[in-house]
Amino acid sequence: MNAESGSLAGRARIHAALGDPARLAIVDALILGDASPGEIARTLDLPTNLVAHHVKVLTEAGLVVRGRSEGDRRRTYLRLRPEALAALTPPPLPGVGRVVFVCTHNSARSQLAAALWKHRTRSAAASAGTKPAARVHPRAVAVAHRHGLALDPAGTAHVSAVVRDEDLVIAVCDNAHEDLTGPVRPRLHWSVPDPVRADTDAAFEAAYADLADRIDRLAPAVIDARP
């Protein structure tokens, strides 16, 4: 993949090319195998001239390439460039050592996030609070246990005792994001609703699911950037 295809302009062109339902259908058809323009036209029930137009747009966006048949040299086949689709993912975050998740009381969201990060990436993580509570919330311990994670019920800490210069700090609550205006500033903010306010198992499960989804999206950007 060339540098231009990974740029904002290149990514925007790919998004624009995929913005037409017919072109998206062509890409879907090519994900699992190659096809000639005529085969695409028959599969999608589209006029051949319209397929030719859409293929031209996809080719110019770098999503599709043509190859001459080794059998009938008059025939061409279309092949998807998976690396172009991969360029749609957010750029990597270089220089990340440890990830530190911060919330107000360090009793639920930040604890769950750090445990999830360690479990899913097998790499270092920590958690902290701007006003740490005396203990981790029992429902946070319980939801972690239900998902095969372990939390130390007494393991809360203040950001000043945890965060180091090289850490990637992620605020997982709005209050922490807005309160941290000094030397420790979150690089990312996840507006995860506070499950303690509802204090129900459902609220803690919802927070867990929200954090798990966000971690799955962030992890490749961090892990792939590491040497």
Image (tube, rainbow, N blue to C red):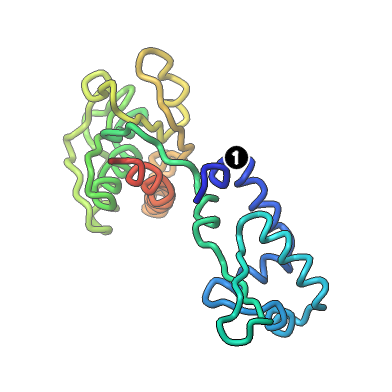
Where is residue 68? Give x, y as percent: 61, 75
Residue 61: x percent and y percent? Answer: 66, 54
Looking at the rendered structure, the kind of residue marked 1 is Leu
Q: Is residue 56 positioned above or below 189 on the image? A: below
43 left or right, relative to 187: right
Q: Nearer the viewer, residue 91 or 159?
A: 91
The residue carrying pointer 1 sits among few (fewer than 14), some (14 to 19) or many (20 or more) residues within 10 Å by Cα, namely: some
Along the viewing direction, whichever of 91 and 83 lies nearer the viewer: 83
Residue 17 screen position, x and y as percent? 70, 56
- Tell me where residue 19 sits by quadrant: bottom right
Q: In the rendered view, would you say 73 is above or below 119? A: below
Q: Which residue is mark 1?
A: 8
Q: Secondary structure at mark 1?
A: helix
Question: Is 7 located above or below residue 22 in the figure?
Answer: above
The residue at the far front in this view is 73
At 28% from the left and 25% from the top, the residue drawn is 166
* Residue toward you, 75 or 135: 75
Residue 101 in which image quadrant: top left
Query: How many numbered marks have been drawn onto this rendered protein structure?
Result: 1
Q: Is residue 176 left or right of residue 16?
A: left
Image coords of residue 178 (percent x, y): 47, 22
Is the C terminus in the top left, top right, bottom left or bottom right quadrant? top left
Q: Residue at x 62, y 76 (%)?
A: 77
Residue at (61%, 64%) from the top-left corner?
Answer: 64
Residue at (73% x, 59% y) in the render: 57
